[in-house]
Amino acid sequence: MSCVQTNYTTLGGRVTCTRCNAKSKRTKQQCRNPAIKGKTKCKHHGGRSTGSKTPEGKACQIAANTKHGNETRAIREERSAKLAELYELEMLGRELGLISGAMVGRKPKEGGKRTRARIDQS
């Protein structure tokens, strides 16, 4: 496995450049191009990018931001709201005596170990 180089010299040792730190997916090797001044990437790997400038562009980028490529922030917020509603319904059912037993979807506080009270109920 190759180590990541941060600087290297060009033009016969007269110029020292920061090296682009992008890596190839296929070969896992570091890019050999010099990075753009003040950046960590070369012109081929997004060094010229300035990012979103307008409020609309920034909002679009935030809305499209995903975690692990599986779900968006909106989906996580929707799931959290549904689980909170489900929890409230479960607590109401327990108050009215319609639901008994262990909490649905909750891990035991003692780390998964069965206590004497839970063993006696079984």
Image (cartoon, grey):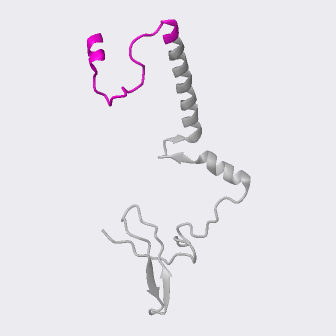
The boundaries of the magenta stretch are 94-122
In the shown orientation, is residue 57 left or right of residue 87? right
User: Between 7 and 107, which is closer to the camera in this rendering?
Assistant: 107
In the shown orientation, is residue 108 left or right of residue 62? left
Whether residue 122 appears in this view of the structure is: no
Relative to 70, residue 28 above or below: below
User: Between 47 and 108, which is closer to the camera in this rendering?
Assistant: 108
Give the x, y percent position of residue 46.
Answer: 56, 66
Residue at position x 41%, y 70% in the image: 30
Q: Is residue 100 magenta?
A: yes
Residue at position x 54%, y 36% in the image: 76
Give the x, y percent position of residue 41.
Answer: 52, 70
Relative to 93, residue 50 above or below: below
Quadrant in the picture for the C terminus: top left
Q: Quadrant of residue 81?
A: top right
Whether residue 26 appears in this view of the structure is: yes
Give the x, y percent position of residue 106.
Answer: 41, 25
Residue at position x 54%, y 13% in the image: 92
Quadrant in the picture for the N terminus: bottom left
Residue at position x 45%, y 86% in the image: 9
In the shown orientation, is residue 73 left or right of residue 121? right
User: Between 122 and 56, which is closer to the camera in this rendering?
Assistant: 122
Query: Count the marks: how many?
Result: 0
Give the x, y percent position of residue 2.
Answer: 33, 71
Magenta part, dominant SS: loop
In the shown orientation, is residue 96 left or right of residue 115? right
